[in-house]
Image (cartoon, rainbow, N blue to C red):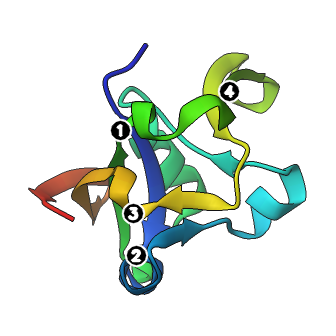
């Protein structure tokens, strides 16, 4: 299992989550019935596929042990059949966030620019 999982959100959504104590689901999560998460190997690809630079995305580094039995690993055919972590919960408690990775856009996609504490 990966040491950490990652949730990509826009900076504004992260700021709201800090006030509310929960990183909520987004529209795709509500549609699919779970919170989409990524691994260290694919979180930048996720950012490139689903986020625009104007959203100022950040990658939340999540402790998977804080998510309990609601965390499931499932095959995603649209991503080459790779297994991705899915959280069957209303959102991610901010207490599970261990760090925030600031993502910077480049000509070839997002890169992790800076790591900060939540």
SS assignment at label 4: strand
Tell me what residue is drawn at x 84 percent, y 51 percent. 33
Disc 1/disc 2 C-alpha distance (Å): 16 Å
Disc 2/disc 3 C-alpha distance (Å): 9 Å
To which residue does mark 2 refer?
14
To which residue does mark 3 refer?
94
Q: Is residue 3 left or right of residue 20?
A: left
Q: Position of residue 38 (x, y in %)?
A: 50, 37
Disc 2/disc 4 C-alpha distance (Å): 23 Å
* Precedes in sequence: disc 1 or disc 3: 1
- Circles 1 and 3, Cβ within 8 Å, touching? The answer is no
* Precedes in sequence: disc 3 or disc 4: 4
SS assignment at label 1: loop
To which residue does mark 1 refer?
63
10 over 68 or under it: above or below? below
* Precedes in sequence: disc 2 or disc 3: 2
- Can residue 52 be seen here? The reply is no
């Amino acid at each position: 299992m990966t040491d950490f999982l990652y949730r990509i959100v826009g900076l504004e959504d992260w700021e709201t989550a800090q006030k509310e104590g929960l990183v909520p689901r987004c529209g795709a999560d509500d549609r699919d019935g779970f919170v989409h998460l990524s691994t260290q190997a694919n979180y930048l690809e996720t950012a490139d596929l689903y986020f625009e630079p104007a959203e100022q995305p950040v990658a939340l580094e999540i402790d998977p042990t804080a998510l309990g039995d609601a965390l499931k690993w499932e095959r995603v055919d649209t991503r080459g059949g790779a297994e991705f972590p899915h959280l069957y919960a209303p959102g991610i408690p901010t207490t599970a966030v261990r760090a925030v990775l600031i993502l910077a856009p480049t000509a070839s996609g997002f890169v992790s620019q800076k790591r900060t504490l939540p």
